[in-house]
Amino acid sequence: MTAEEEARDRQENPPRNTSAPPAEDASGRKGDPTHENTDGDQTAHKAGSKSVAQKEAGSKYADRSMPPARKVPGAFGEEPE
């Protein structure tokens, strides 16, 4: 098709529905929560100050990134003599 034919075809046959489907949770309920105050709602992850502190206490690299991995002698059977 030429560009003019394609433009005319799009004008004559527009898409039916270009919007996204409604949001749906795991139980099949559609749409946003109906209540305004979501303070006590459960979340899929822990984000409280106590749980964050516990994660950092158990982490070796809590305040910096983990160093990159390096090759070591002896890998793949190539041990030094």
Image: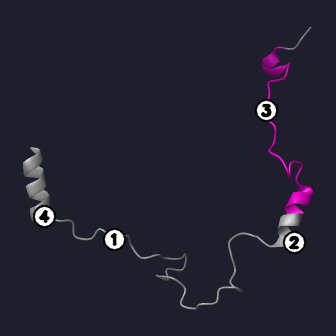
3 or 1: tag closer to the N-terminus: 1
As for residue 61 lying within the magenta part, the answer is yes
- Name the residue tied to disc 3: 69
- Point out the residue furthest to the top here: 81
- Name the residue tied to disc 1: 19
Mark pair 2, 3: CA separation = 31 Å
The magenta span reads 54-78
4 or 3: tag closer to the N-terminus: 4
Q: Residue at x 83, y 65 (%)?
A: 52
Q: Are marks 3 and 1 in contact (CB under 8 Å)?
A: no
Q: Residues within 10 Å of mark 1 (few under 14, many from 20)?
A: few
Mark pair 4, 3: CA separation = 56 Å
Looking at the image, residue 26 lies above or below residue 54: below
Q: Is residue 69 left or right of residue 17?
A: right
Q: Residues within 10 Å of mark 3 (few under 14, many from 20)?
A: few
2 or 1: tag closer to the N-terminus: 1
What is the magenta segment's predominant secondary structure? loop
Residue type at numbered disc 1: Ser
- Name the residue tied to disc 4: 13
The image quarter containing residue 47 is bottom right
